[in-house]
């Protein structure tokens, strides 16, 4: 059973402003890019692992279970809902899989993504370094 789409026959119109709002999140960019480059649906855990690795710029063998778990919480409780509401993805909770939706909204989003300086998002900022710089400037660390 596929869960997370609107009533059958209801299409969500997406304009360019909405598309850029969706793309404003680095995590959502990573989710979408992983799904675009995947050969079909991805398991939620696999997608969470990939997002954690890319977000923290870590090789697969060094990403921690905690980083994957935090990524999964963000994806499931925040980002999937936004993507579902705009009919960009489908989530099959029985199979625990996420896939791109075949809707006009996705086409609008991907057109907008090509206008971003960092699409595909291969050069995402290193959040650990950014947080360290922020903490140092705030006087929270040595």
Image (cartoon, grey):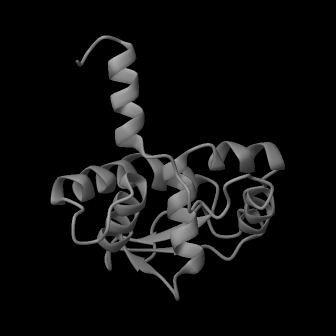
The answer to whether residue 4 is left or right of residue 103 is left
Relative image position of residue 84 (x, y in whole percent) = 55, 58
The answer to whether residue 78 is left or right of residue 110 is left
Residue at left 26%, top 15%? 140
Q: Is residue 127 visible?
A: yes
Q: How many marks?
A: 0
Foreground pick, 136 / 121 = 136
Residue at left 82%, top 50%? 15
Relative image position of residue 59 (x, y in whole percent) = 31, 68
The answer to whether residue 44 is left or right of residue 101 is left
> Which quadrant is the C terminus positioned in?
top left
Relative image position of residue 111 (x, y in whole percent) = 81, 63
Q: Is residue 81 visible?
A: no
Foreground pick, 57 / 77 = 57
Image quadrant in which you'd find residue 98:
bottom left
Relative image position of residue 29 (x, y in whole percent) = 57, 56
Height in image: 15 above or below 94?
above
Residue at left 39%, top 15%? 137
Image quadrant in which you'd find residue 75:
bottom left
Residue at left 45%, top 68%? 3
Q: Give the farthest residue toward the top.
A: 139
> Which quadrant is the N terminus positioned in?
bottom left
Q: Give the farthest residue toward the front.
A: 142
């Amino acid at each position: 059973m596929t869960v997370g789409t609107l009533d059958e026959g209801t299409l969500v119109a997406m304009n360019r402003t909405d598309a850029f709002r969706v793309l404003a999140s680095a995590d959502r960019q990573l989710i979408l890019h992983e799904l675009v480059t995947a050969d079909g649906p991805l398991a939620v855990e696999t997608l969470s692992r990939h997002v954690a690795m890319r977000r923290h710029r870590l090789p697969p063998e060094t990403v921690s279970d905690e980083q994957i778990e935090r990524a999964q919480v963000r994806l499931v409780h925040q980002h999937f809902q936004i993507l579902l509401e705009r009919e960009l993805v489908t989530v099959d909770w029985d199979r625990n899989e996420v896939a791109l939706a075949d809707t006009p909204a996705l086409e609008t989003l991907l057109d907008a993504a090509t206008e971003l300086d960092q699409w595909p998002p291969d050069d995402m900022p290193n959040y650990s370094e950014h947080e360290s710089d922020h903490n140092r400037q705030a006087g929270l660390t040595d």
